[in-house]
Image (tube, coloured by chain):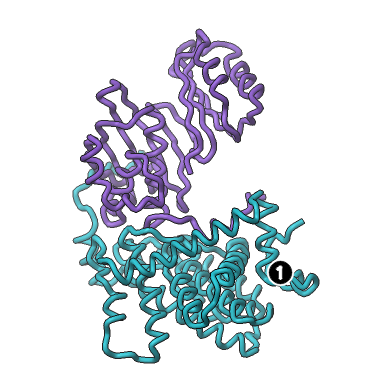
Amino acid sequence: MSLLFTDFASWQQHCAQTGEPLWQPVLNYEMEQKGRSEEAIWDGLQRAYDVMRDAVHTGLSENMTSRSGMINNGAKKVAASPVTVLSPEFKQLITRALGAKEVNSCMGRVVAAPTAGASGILPGVLVTLQDLHKLEDRSILEGLLVAAGIALIIEQNASLAGAVGGCQAETGSAAAMGAGAIVYCLGGSVDQALAAVAITIQCMLGLVCDPVAGLVEVPCVVRNASAAAIAFSSAQIAIAGVDPVIPVDQCVAALGEVGESMETRYKETALGGLANTPRARQIEQKVLIQDIQILPDEAQM
Amino acid sequence: MAEKSSIFDMIGPVMIGPSSSHTAGVVRIARAAIRVLGSQPTHATITFYNSFARTYEGHGSDRAIVAGLLDYPTDDKRIRESFDHAKEAGLNFTFQGVGNASTMHPNTIRLELRDERAGTQVEVIGQSRGGGVIRIVEVDGFPCDFSAALHTLIIDADDVKGSIAFIADVIAHDDCNIATMNVSRQGKNQVARQFIEIDSPLTELSLQYLRHLRWVHQVRYIPAID
C-alpha cells in the first residue's frame, strides 16, 4: 500500500522508517493510485518542467500584453531596469516568476501548479534554483515530486482553489510547494523541507482572492513574484534549522480554517478588496461586456 | 471516498491560460459539442450565460470556444489566434451574452451548431465546473449529464419495453462497464434518448450492431476527450 498523503506527519514518519527520500513515496503513490508506469511519470514531469522553462523564456522574450491592457510586459521592464534593489539573482527570480505568470494572463501555455492563477511561482523558483546551483534536471524533477506531495496534502486538508480558500490557497500553496522543493534540492533534511512548508504557510496565511475585473491579472501577477520570494525566504530559514514552532499539519489546518471563514467577496468573486476599489470599478466598465441581455428576475415566480 | 487526485493535477494540467474554467473547460465543451454534431460546423451561435456573459472577452473564453470548435486540444498554442484559423476553416460564428439566468450554472454556454455541407445541426448546453472539468447538461432539449472524460454513447431509439436492458447487455458483452446513464423521451411510445457513459471504449462491431437494430434511429459515440 502506498502512502496516501493524508498528512505531513505520516509522510515524515514513512521517510524516517524506510530511509526513502521525500519524493519516493510520491512516485509510488502515482504508480499505485493512478496506475502510471515510472517511466510515464518521469516523462510527464519532464514535460511539465519543459513547459515551465518555455513559459519563463516566452514571458521574457515575446510581447506580453493582455487584452485588458492591465498586463503590459512587466517582466521585461524589471529585467531591463538599471536599478538592482537587492541582488542580480533576486532580480532574476522576480522577472522569471512575473514572466511565466504573464504568459498565463496573455493566453500562452503554462503548467497549472497547482492552479493557473499560481502558474508563475514554480517556474520562477525552479529555473532560478537550477541556474544558481547548477542542478541536473533530474534533481528538479525530484523536487517537483516533493512539491506534488505537498499539494496533495494541502488539497485534502484545506484547499488549492481561490474560489474556495482565497489567494492563500493558490499562491500560498504554490509557494509552499516551491519552498519544500528548494530545501529538498539543496540537500536539506525531511524535517527542514516540511518546516519550509510550515513557514511559507505562516507567511501567506490570510491572503484574499480579489482579482480586478475578475481577470487573472491584477494582483495575481505581482503576487506570483512575491510568493516566489517568500518560497526562498522560507527555505533559507528552514534549511538553517529554525523551528517553525507550529507543526506543518497544524499550519495546513489553519489555512483551511481561515479559508472557510473568509467571506465570499474575497473568494474570486471580484466583489471585495482590490476588485472593489474605485479604479477597479472603472476598469471593469471598460473591460467587461456591457451589451448583454438580462433576464427578468425569476425570484418571485 | 472521493477519487484520489493525480500528481499531474498538482503539477498540471499543461494548459493555455488564463484560467482552467474560462479556457480549458470552455475548449472541452466545444470539443464535446462538435462530436455530438458529428462534424466540424460551418456556423455557430455561441451564448455565454451569467458570470461568463460579461467576462468571456477578458478571459479569452471567446477564443477558447472557437478553438474547441476547431478541435484544438486545451494546451494548443493556436487557441489565442483561433479567430484567424476559424476564417481559414470556413467556420462562421457569432456571440451573445445573457445575464441573470438564475436556473443555470454560473459558467454556462449554449452552442447552436450547424454543418451546412452535411445538413446537420445540434444545440448543446455545457457547464464549466472549474479545473477544466465540464458537464454537458442538454442536447437538443433532452436533459443529460456527461463529462466527456469517459466514453459517451448517445442513442436515439423507440420508447419500447426492454430497449434499455438490451442496449446495456450489448455494452456488457463488449466487456464495458456503464458508469452513468440518463434516459428521457419526447413522450410515451415516442423517441427516447439514452446518454450512457462507459469506462472503456466500445468496439466498432458493437456500434455497428446497435446501429443495425430496427428500433434504433441514431447512435453517436464520443470517445473520451483529454
Residue at far top of view:
B214
From this view, report whether residue B214 is shown above or below residue A62.
Answer: above
Count of all numbered marks drawn on residues in the image: 1
Residue closer to the observer: A34 or B106: A34
Q: Residue at x 57, y 74 (%)?
A: A181
Q: Residue A86 sits in which quadrant? A: bottom left
| Residue B87 percent across, percent down from the top left | 21, 40
Indicate the quadrant where residue A167 lies. Answer: bottom left
Quadrant the C terminus of chain A occupies: top left
Left or right of B35 in this view: B164: right
Q: Residue at x 62, y 61 (%)?
A: A156
**What shade does chain A have?**
cyan
Classify mark 1: helix, strand or loop.
helix
Residue A182 % position (x, y) = 56, 78
Label 1 environment density (alpha carbons within 10 Å; few <14, some 14–19, many ≥20): many
Name the residue that disc number 1 marks: A11
